[in-house]
Amino acid sequence: MNDHDLRRVLGLLAQDDTLRAFAALALGLPGDLSPKVLHKLATGGLAARDDDGKWRATPERFRELLRAHAEPAEELGAEERVLRAFLVDGRLTTTTMRRDKRLVVLRHIVRVFEPGARYPEKDVNVALRAFHDDYAALRRYLVDEGLLSREGNVYWRSGGPVDV
């Protein structure tokens, strides 16, 4: 497959008559199914005739084009896979996970705190609430794992990776 095939399919979908006909075929609705329009769809690979002569949409054509033109999937490291599994739009989906995975997530979260800076508990809560509503559990996990230290109601970063 080449760029010509992709342009042909997109061109067919950009035309009102072929787009309506493809939609009608895909949804099984009556529509403008003139022989000329059906032939256009067939040459673009978007329609085909069954053995009984009935026309049907061929949406698998989109998968073929995607496979032919898609960039290879990027190789993800183990930590990145964990982060993608538990963080959606920057928010933690759960605080319940195995310890090794929780450590990966906590090392990511602790980066919001600057090394050497002191934070009142209220500021720590606000920063952690951005990741999950149960900020108290996150705060406790960070302290228990030695990523944050605490004295009174003041916290500071005491572990985790540092971005240089």
Image (tube, rainbow, N blue to C red):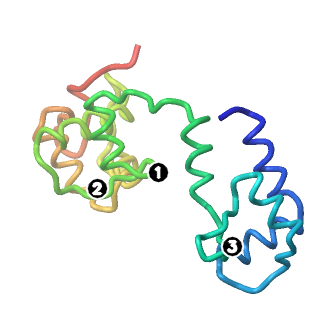
Left/right of residue 155 with respect to residue 70 in the rendered view: left
Amino acid type, label 1? Asp
Residue 106 location, x and y as percent?
24, 39
Tell whether label 3 touches label 2 (CB within 8 Å): no
Crowd class of label 3 (few under 14; some 14 to 19; many from 20; radius 10 Å): some
Q: Residue furthest front?
A: 52
Give the mark nearest the N terminus, 2 or 3: 3
Q: Residue furthest bottom?
A: 30
Residue 80 location, x and y as percent?
33, 33
Amino acid type, label 2? Tyr
Q: Nearer the viewer, mark 1 or mark 2?
A: 1
Residue carrying label 3: 55
> Where residue 19 is drawn, which disc sits there?
none
> Which residue is pictured at 44% across the width and 29% down the height?
74
| On-image quarter of the C terminus | top left
Amino acid type, label 3? Trp
Q: Nearer the viewer, mark 2 or mark 3?
A: 3
Q: Nearer the viewer, mark 1 or mark 3?
A: 3
| On-image quarter of the N terminus | top right
Q: Label 2's element?
A: helix
Residue carrying label 2: 135
Tell whether label 3 touches label 1 (CB within 8 Å): no
Q: Residue furthest top?
A: 164
> Which residue is pictured at 86% across the width and 66% down the height?
37
Q: CA distance from mark 1 to mark 2?
A: 17 Å
Indicate whether 148 appears above or below 163: below
> Where residue 89 is drawn, which disc sits there?
1
- For the residue pair 73 and 36, the one nearer the viewer reads as 36
